[in-house]
Amino acid sequence: MTENSKILSANGAPAAGGPVPAPPEAPEVGDWDPLAAQRTADDPPLDVLLSGTVFFDIVFTGMDRLPQPGEELWSKGMGSSPGGIANLATATARLGLRTGLVAGFGDDAYGDWMWHTLADEEGIDLSASKQFRDFHSALTASIAAHGDRAMVTHGHELPEPLSSLIARAPAARAAVVDLAGETSWWSELARGGALIFADIGYDSTGKWDPADLAPLQHCHAFTPNALEATAYTRTDSPGKAVRALADLVPLAVVTDGVDGAYAIDSSTGEEVYCPAVPVHAIDTTGAGDVFAAGLVLGTLAQWPLAQRLRFASLCSALAVQQFGGSLAAPGWGDITDWWRHLSAAAADGDLRAAYTRGGYEFLDGVVPDHPVLGRRRAQGTFALRSDAGGH
């Protein structure tokens, strides 16, 4: 739980010899909706709709290196959390976006725990998702060591395709999709006026065929990383790649890890480069998903492009300082804590803090002015009878 997520006790002593004053009421703690002022009665029930595979992730951290064949190493840290598309769903929900997820779950203990975590703790709408009888959850074990990762995954095809479930999902203002996945559901969503934010994965064939980008005709935004962007556009830098992609979508964004992000919004004429927030990363699992969540929020909030990119970069930077994929995603308590600590350091004369703060002054009008709900972090095992209610 972060500092801003706690209810702070009242300070102050009674005047000598005087009556003891009644303690002030504790400040109300609740969720924070950054889009509250913009919402109307005509809005769809969801801000963002997602669909994909959910994995039960076990992440080992604090390793000096990856193990060799036949070797057993002990890790210093371990976390369990919902993974796969749950990384993105948790990230959007924690930023206050009304999130719907269409996914298949097993009916095992892993599936029960992930369903409870996503629906009851994170507030994600699973009305179009389904738990399949006699079906076990997909699982990924991941080892993180010095910026590198090794993973082992096991799972099976769902008994029923997700396309048969998506029609049950509530309407949404936006969707985040994978160009390599099933496209019919989100192309239909786009025709209904939803903003489609697309990503794409590594092409293991090595072809990087530009024809793979044809579905971008339905999309508002495309957010590949630098390797993917340069390979598909046949360019030699992320700056050149983002210009080529800007001809395909209104909002083109190319992320380049610690080297920052590049973006062009053709609908407004804005062109922005945003440096990454320097942090010590311990687990980069889901960092791209958190970036995408911040970008979606900023776009729906109609922020200038520079603010959207800075906010997305900040959310990603906060996430990689935790381990455990989806449950590392920051909530508004984490963002507010970071902002207040940075502002205090800047006021104390820290030049680096003052410089960084200058790019994030818009947060003064965004962060909540009251304590907010804390967020669960990844635990060594999935908790059934722990103090989860206190989180």
Image: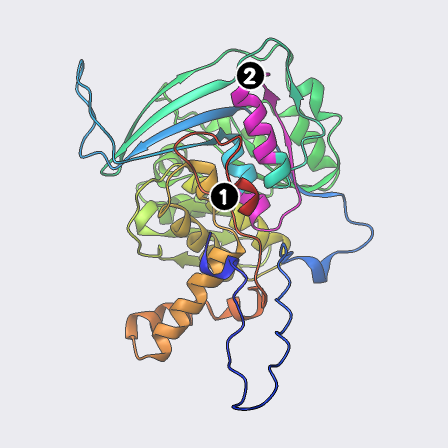
- Residue beneath label 2, please? 108
Q: Which numbered disc covers residue 252?
A: none
Ranked by sequence position, the earlier of labels 2 and 1 is 2
Q: Which of the 4 image quarters holds residue 57?
A: top left
Q: Identify which residue is drawn at 39% across, 57% down.
A: 274
The outermost residue toward the right is: 41
Is residue 349 in view? yes
Q: Amino acid at mark 2?
A: Asp
Q: Residue shown at 47%/56% (left/top)?
A: 334
Residue 376: which disc? 1
Counting from the top left corner in percent of width and height, residue 50 is at 61, 33
On the image, which quarter does residue 325 sit in? top left
Badge 2: how crowded within 10 Å, few (<14), some, or many (20+)? some
Find numbered disc 1 in the image and state the secondary structure of the residue it sits on.
loop
Label count reads 2
Is 187 displayed left or right of 384 in the figure? Answer: right
Residue 382 is situated, as x and y percent measured from the top left of the image, at 47, 30
User: Can you say whether 216 is above or below 14 in the image?
Assistant: above
Residue range corresponding to the magenta coloring: 91-118
Task: Give the CA distance from mark 2 to mark 1.
Answer: 22 Å
